[in-house]
Image: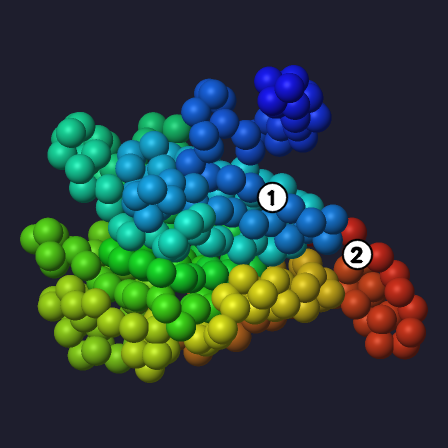
Amino acid sequence: TKMHAASLTRRALKPSINRLASRGLASESSKPNLVEVSSTPSGIYTVTLNNPKKHNALSFDMFRSISKTAQRLRADSSVRCVIINGEGRSFCSGLDVPSMVKNPSNGSKLLERPAEADPGTEITNLAQDVGYIWRTCPFPVIAAIHGKCYGGGLQIALGADFRYAAPDSEFSIMEAKWGIIPDMSGSVTLREVGRLDWIKELAMTARIFGAEEAHKFGLVSRVVDDHMAEANTIAEELVKRSPDAVALTKQLLNETWNNMSEKDALVLETDLQKKLLPSWNQIAASAKNFGMDLPYKGRTVG
């Protein structure tokens, strides 16, 4: 019977759910997970925003789920790369305004730094966490974008290291439509991707624009026919490299790109290199150039 089949399915899935729960990645309630996490044996984790009926709009619970998921992945040395995508027709349509109107106190909570601030995110509030926290992760983060990518959704994507967009993607720095400013770490990430006059125009008008224009403005890395295939292809390339070298390359470029003196940048470059020389993962990476396939160990830096 259908009921018997459903019971068997639940029993078959229970071990997988328990494994996720043991790693802190499963929902604590019976409600559908607002953020789903899956992984491959090579350490590529896919984080899927999962509220498709609302184009993955950001409710207070969604904010918390994204932040907690990122914190747990960041603490796991087996994670080699993360791909963020959206279930259904969109990546993320931005703030779930009706839910915030219904519970106005949640809006204030988003702007407060939680008392249980996680190490590495003390400078952000919860609203900023969901974008900025991906920058603090010691592994590459890829945003695979399709459909709507508005407001807070765009700022989540900008927290990633790479952004691959499907041709049907739509973008907007939409906060001005609601009489507010981009406040989910956009002040940090927007300054890295495009000319100031372009960003001002987009932020002040809140207009919607397509994928090709987003690429022109520097908001996406590439426009591709299959955004998930591209993300997975790049992820597979990244996991071939030493997890330590990848982590420290991300740290070096993030910290020096826009706001560090040449002297301090050169000092940091040397300090980070000393962490790699010598190390097992550096030796393993070098050995591959001579036909020796030494396995990498879990990430030891970052």
Disc 1 residue type? Answer: Ser
Q: Which mark is residue 38?
A: 1
Marked residue nearer the N-terminal end (1 or 2): 1
Q: Residue at x 7, y 53 (%)?
A: 179
Measure the alpha-carbon separation of dots 1 and 2: 22 Å
Judging depth in this view, the residue of 267 and 100 nearest the camera is 100
From the viewer's perspective, is 224 left or right of 188?
right
The relative height of residue 123 versus residue 214 in the rendered view (above or below) is: above
Q: Give the x, y percent position of residue 172.
A: 24, 64
In contact (CB < 8 Å): disc 1 and disc 2 = no
Q: Is residue 220 visible?
A: no
Image quarter hosting the N terminus: top right
Residue 108 sits in quarter: top left
Q: Which residue is at the far left?
A: 179
Categorize mark 2 by other alpha carbons within 10 Å: few (<14), some (14-19), many (20+).
Answer: some
Give the residue pinned by disc 2.
Answer: 296
Image location of residue 227, percent across then percent down: 50, 66
Name the mark nearer the viewer: 1 or 2: 1
Callout 2: SS? loop
The mark total stands at 2
Neighbour tally class for label 1: few under 14, some 14-19, many 20 plus, Cα within 10 Å = some
Q: Secondary structure at mark 1?
A: strand
- The label number, if any, that marks residue 238 in the structure image: none
Tell which residue pokes out farthest to the front in this image.
1
Identified by mark 2, the residue type is Tyr
Instruction: Find residue 124 and report its horizontal and vertical position in percent.
Output: 32, 45
Query: Is residue 178 at least partly visible in the picture?
Result: yes
Figure colour scheme: rainbow
Residue 79's place in the image compared with 246, above or below, is: above
- Rendered residue at 51%/61% (across/down): 142
From the top left corner, tell me how far across and down residue 60 is, in percent. Answer: 29, 34
Residue at 89% in and 65% down: 293
